[in-house]
């Protein structure tokens, strides 16, 4: 992909010139163009963009990868991201600072900054800045939901989708305390690392409260679709508190439960799941 630096949201003179002349990328999908863009000074603060340069505005899909907040990379989401570009969306495949580099709320800050950059330069990418969804996987589902409940609604955000989203790090912390499942224990450790290495008590309680998506529900938040496997290590109960809290302020949350133990991208690839997610998104953005 071509590289274009749009650091700190503002265009540098050189980048401004480059912004007028995007370099097409052979993506193997007819009519698409693509590039990689930086939205900050860290090497992790970048995103891949795919768009159809046809002179019209397209709804947007932001994809956020998982990886225990401590690993993973947008490159693992390329196939899924491109599938949405092939459906006609402008797609932003987002990287963010990992917990080993920066503690919470850096990850939410990065997701919001990536969205702000995309909205600011929407014309460049044939993107409708007032019509987009955010789709997150596992830890990325936590970030997507955190964007959805940040403030009193985000401009242009029409919906949030989580695949195995870790809605409540506090629940993950509690569930992992005595769990025999090694993945639940690992998730507990990952949540502690996300919080800067401290447990949810004393001086760290405020950080953990900030990480709890449901505690920030407000009436202008975006609707959410949450998909879990019945017996995976991030269970459907993770999303039920969010459904209750958002329901109290009139925001719908749909929880879909699939049989089995598939998690995150593996769950997305289970028969019928991707199609259900795609339909839900289409119903929100047209």
Image (cartoon, rainbow, N blue to C red):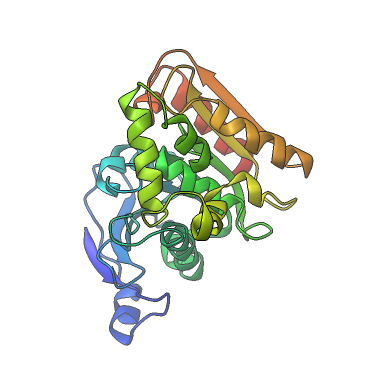
Point 35% across, 57% down: residue: 96
The quadrant of the rendering that contains the C terminus is top right
Viewer-proximal residue, 283 or 254?
A: 254
Q: Is residue 267 rendered to the left or right of residue 153?
A: left
Point 26% across, 41% down: residue: 76
Point 48% across, 44% down: residue: 142
Q: Is residue 101 rendered to the left or right of residue 173?
A: left
Q: Quadrant of residue 128?
A: bottom right
Would you place residue 121 above or below residue 89 in this image? Answer: below
Residue 230 drawn at (x, y percent): 49, 17
Viewer-proximal residue, 33 or 156?
A: 156
Would you place residue 247 above or below residue 152 in this image? Answer: above
Q: Quadrant of residue 20?
A: bottom left
Q: Kindly give the residue lying farthest to the front in the view shown.
A: 202
Q: Is residue 68 rendered to the left or right of residue 235?
A: left
Task: For residue 221, say whether it is visible.
Answer: yes
The quadrant of the rendering that contains the N terminus is bottom left
Task: For residue 56, say whether it is visible.
Answer: no
Q: Kindly give the residue lying farthest to the top in the view shown.
A: 259
Point 67% across, 50% down: residue: 221
């Amino acid at each position: 992909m071509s590289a274009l630096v749009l650091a700190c949201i503002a265009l540098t003179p050189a980048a401004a010139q480059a912004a007028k002349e995007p370099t097409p990328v052979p993506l193997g999908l007819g009519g698409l163009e693509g590039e990689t863009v930086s939205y900050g000074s860290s090497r992790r603060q970048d995103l891949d963009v795919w768009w159809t340069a046809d002179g019209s505005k397209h709804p947007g899909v932001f994809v956020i990868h998982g990886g225990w907040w401590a690993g993973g990379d947008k490159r693992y989401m390329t196939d899924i991201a491109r599938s949405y570009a092939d459906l006609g969306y402008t797609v932003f495949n987002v990287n963010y600072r990992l917990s080993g580099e920066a503690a919470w709320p850096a990850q939410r800050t990065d997701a919001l900054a990536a969205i702000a950059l995309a909205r600011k330069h929407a014309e460049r990418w044939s993107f409708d800045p007032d019509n987009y969804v955010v789709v997150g996987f596992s830890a990325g589902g936590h970030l997507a939901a955190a964007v959805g409940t940040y403030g009193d609604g985000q401009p242009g955000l029409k919906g949030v989708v989580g695949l195995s989203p870790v809605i409540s790090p506090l629940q993950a912390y509690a569930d992992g305390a005595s769990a025999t499942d090694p993945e639940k224990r690992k998730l507990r450790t990952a949540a502690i690392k996300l919080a800067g290495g401290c447990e949810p008590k004393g001086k760290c309680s405020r950080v953990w409260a900030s990480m709890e998506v449901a505690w920030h529900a407000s009436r202008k938040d975006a609707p959410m679709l949450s998909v879990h496997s019945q017996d995976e290590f991030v269970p459907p109960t993770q999303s039920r508190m969010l459904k209750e809290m958002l329901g109290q302020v009139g925001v719908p949350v749909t929880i879909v439960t699939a049989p089995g133990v598939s998690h995150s991208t593996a769950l997305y690839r289970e028969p019928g799941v991707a199609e259900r997610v795609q339909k839900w998104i289409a119903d929100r953005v047209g």
